Image (tube, coloured by chain):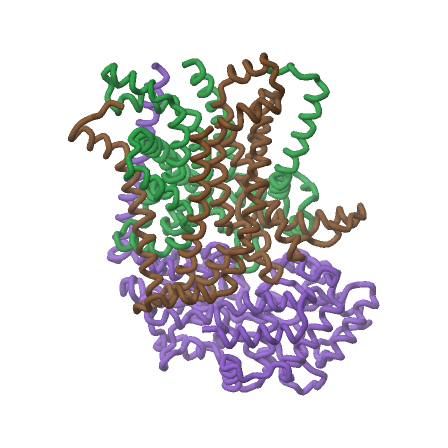
Amino acid sequence: MVGSRSSSAAWLKYVVLAVTLFLFIVPFILLLLNSFKANQDITANPLSLPGRLDLANYTNAFDKMNYIAAFTNSLIVTVASVLIIALCAAMTAHYFVRNNTKFNQYTFLLMVASMIIPFQAIMIPLVKVYGSLGMLNSKLSLIYMYLGFGSSLAVFIYHGFVKSVPAELEEAALIDGCTRRQTFFRIVFPVLAPTTATISILNVLWVWNDFLLPSLILTGPAQRTLPLSTYNFYGTYSVDYGPLMAGLVLTILPVIVVYLFAQKYIIRGVMQGSIK
Amino acid sequence: MKRRSRTSILIVSLLVIMVLSACGNAANNGQEAGGSSSGGDGVKVTLLNSKGEIQQPLEEAAKAFSASNPDITVEVSLVPAGQSPFERASTLYASGNPATITMLDTGDVEKFKDRVLDLSGEKWMADTVPNATEHTTFDGKNYAFPLAIEGYGFIYNKKVLDEAVGGDFDPSTIRTRDDLENLFKQIEATGKKALVISPMDWSLGAHYLPLAYATQSKDLAEVDQFIASLRAGEVDLANNAPFNGLMDTFDLMMAHNIDSASPLAGTYERGPELLGKGEVGIWFMGNWAWPQISSFDTADGQYGFLPVPISNNPEDFGNSEISSAVSKRLVIDKEFSSPEQQAAAKKFLEWLVYDEQGQDYLVNKANIIPAFSNITIPAADPLGKSIQEHIAAGKTQQSMSTLPADHWAQLGSSMQKYLAKAGDRAGLITEIENYWKNVK
Amino acid sequence: MIKEKGWNRLLTRLLFTGPTLFAFVTVMIVPFLYGIYLTFTNWDGISTTQSYVGFQNYGEVFRDAVFWKSFGLTLQYVFFSVVLINAVAFALAYVLTKGLKGQSIFRAGFFLPNLVGGIVLGFIWQFIFSNVLVYFGQQAGIPIFSASWLADPDKAFWSLVIVTVWQYAGYMMVIYVAGLMGVPNDILEAASIDGANGWTKLRRMVLPLMVPSFIVCIFLSLQRTFMVYDVNLALTKGGPFKSTEMVSMHVYGKAFLSRDYGVGQAEALVLFVLVAAITLIQVYFSKKLEVEA
């Protein structure tokens, strides 16, 4: 596919893409630049280059955020939630598509509709219910809630893609004596790999950066995730921008790494899919 | 086939690990929580801080307190940015998991009065400054500990003003609107700009506009009466002298504002920078801005407050008084905290007021102006000092700290409209009067 | 499909849908119903007592002119944002699935905006709009940039749209990329041999196959933009003078700022019903499209 075009058109395309990309990442460059600067230099001129590579903000953020502990908490919550959501949602979506009864249709519709519920509308009832059950301040409850909140979107996305998996493939497997479960795990789930990777990326992003839900559920400092500990830099009227930006860079770096890694996996998954 | 099974094994084992580790943590927490409430080997007190800039000093104070009281640990958590103290505290109450000590704004204490301890019998009650507990006393019982006095007005950069008046600037010479106008012109004659108006709704709605209510009378009861008449729709603001005087001063400020070309474009961060660097002589703000001003300071730390004049009669109330009041309160939970925790919380408050170390953290580390007369340490920064001097000289008026909770947001936006000249004074008056008639 | 029987069937059902639905119902539906119950009381979020007030809170919703005004404003905002987000996202995804060198770097780059959220995003964009663009406009003599966009009600609205597009285009691009990768290459190659040009291929082959992705992305962008809160708060705070206060922000302020929890909760419900109606109509019609395509 590459090289089928004239080189000037390809160049033009690159230039347009590069300019667009630049517009997209300008704020991110600003974030990175300013994470090396002192607070007054940031508010005076966020565009100026840092005078020198000063890591003071990073060490400050690292200490204040209790980075290692918060990172561990975030990692546990994110990995567990993302895996559980992907697995459960894929199964549910698959079941809904293959058993297209009225009940399943309405349940699916209910799940889609629930995505429109503003979080603020269930925030207080949620903590009231789970507070009275004594289920707060535990990562396990948080992971469980991520399944509850995240499954709708995941089922919704899977639902569209499960349809593109030919039903004949599954029927053949069933005739060969596989059970529904085996069929799903051996045939369907692997074929859905690119979708799973996409959903997982979106979920990693959401769970890793989520602030409001963990702030309600994880009340003890020992349980804090990265976004929660970043908030140590906020004042009532002003913000300590230097360490905050350093903290944010530290928070999002792992996600970028995961994203670049997952990219490869998506491509590989598609290639496997096309071999089938 | 091979990679499929490897992937699934990986997923399953990861899941198992995650669930196990999460379980392990949950179990540990259970023990921690159990330990704290039973109070066997130590009491754990939690404090919900809603004043972000003192988070660090508070945590240090908590450590110092535990060092001298080894059986008590105090754990400080912060109200997240974007959430109000009221929202956070009520959410925590809803979850059955409130902090032992919660820091609230003055106006919110009443909502919580059924859930927090009566503190009328505490030792520090005898040492509070005047007007420290009136707003948190209901049916003769005081429910809150007054934490900090805050004040606001025109902050001036003395170096800029010295240059403008050609000598040593004396703040007591500014007693009328004409004096202020003259000063603005003197500053502008030196090639600088007179002042910057920060256009945030909270600054205009919670600090500037309420001066119109507070300057109605020296007598606080009459101010309360004025608010009651506003609610009843009986006030004719168009013919109200303090209100019009204040807005005339605002017109003057608008005319000399450095940002007059685009008055709503500025951010909070712009104010301390312009003032600290001496690009303007005056900024309407409060003593909490000191850390930001000091990071741009070019005047050797010489700053102070000027009152906002509302008329040309130097004798009028408000022309020589700056606005100040207790702004943050601590309440102690009585519903979910054990008696040991409550006692420990009380001990912590007492430590802040009477222990030398506690006083030091309050005044020198957290830059707070305490509301207790027994604390004699002078304020640590020039703005705090300026407020203390005004208090000592009796030159203060009580800030309006029990306005309806959405007053700043609703009328702050009306003030913005006026500032941007997108509305006139008649429109502003209509919006203020309507707000008060409809507020709950 | 081969039918399973009795216990086995139930077991399969439980295994496949049980965990998801249980979590979904207990985490979303139960609190939601409880929230509905609260709208019929005068509970203010903190008081220890509450009493039944019937439909009074809903009456107030319909009398709250500001709520309906901000809902109208939100509709405009949603329309422009959704159209622009999906146009940009699809264009990016289309170009970045052609096997360009370094396309995964480009994709990661376009995706970055999703990683910076909340107040910092607001701070940086606020600076860009009120300082960088103004400086640029004054130096280059371009009047439209010479005054801060955030200080003008109309331009502040467009600033919000721009930041929203910037934020979500990369997100939707990822979904479009996943969809485009599912378009079989052999079909396209066959079409090329038959002499179809790029535009015809896009219109005749790619777009019909992309309908599921469009449904997902349009739904998601509808949902995100209707619920906009963070960007609104961080960038304009509803200003200047409440001219860009979107409906979520109004509802939030009603519940937690004006201490009118019951009315705020009721407004959230009314909003839910309205938005649900709009998005479900969208999903319904595009599902039909999917069947026809």
Looking at this view, name the residue that lies furthest to the front.
C292
Q: Is residue C76 above or below residue A51?
A: below
Residue at the image point whose x is 25% and y is 14% from the top:
A176
Q: Position of residue C108 (x, y in %)?
A: 55, 31
Q: Position of residue A242 (x, y in %)?
A: 59, 47
Q: Is residue C213 above or below residue B71?
A: above
- Provide the letter of the chain coloured brown: C
Q: Is residue C40 left or right of residue A11?
A: left
Q: Nearer the viewer, residue A276 or A42?
A: A276
Q: Nearer the viewer, residue C134 or A190?
A: A190
Q: Is residue C181 left or right of residue B242?
A: left
Q: Nearer the viewer, residue C77 or B435?
A: C77
Q: Nearer the viewer, residue A138 or A274?
A: A274
Q: Position of residue B14 (x, y in %)?
A: 34, 29
Quadrant including the N terminus of chain C: top left
Residue at the image point whose x is 72% and y is 81% from the top:
B176
Whether residue B302 appears in this view of the structure is: no
Looking at this view, name the residue that lies furthest to the top.
C193
Q: Colour of chain B?
A: purple
Q: Is residue A179 left or right of residue C42?
A: left
Q: Is residue C198 above or below residue C26?
A: above
- Provide the letter of the chain coloured green: A
Whether residue A155 appears in this view of the structure is: yes
Q: Quadrant of residue C62?
A: bottom left
Q: Quadrant of residue B143?
A: bottom left
Q: Position of residue B409 (x, y in %)?
A: 54, 65
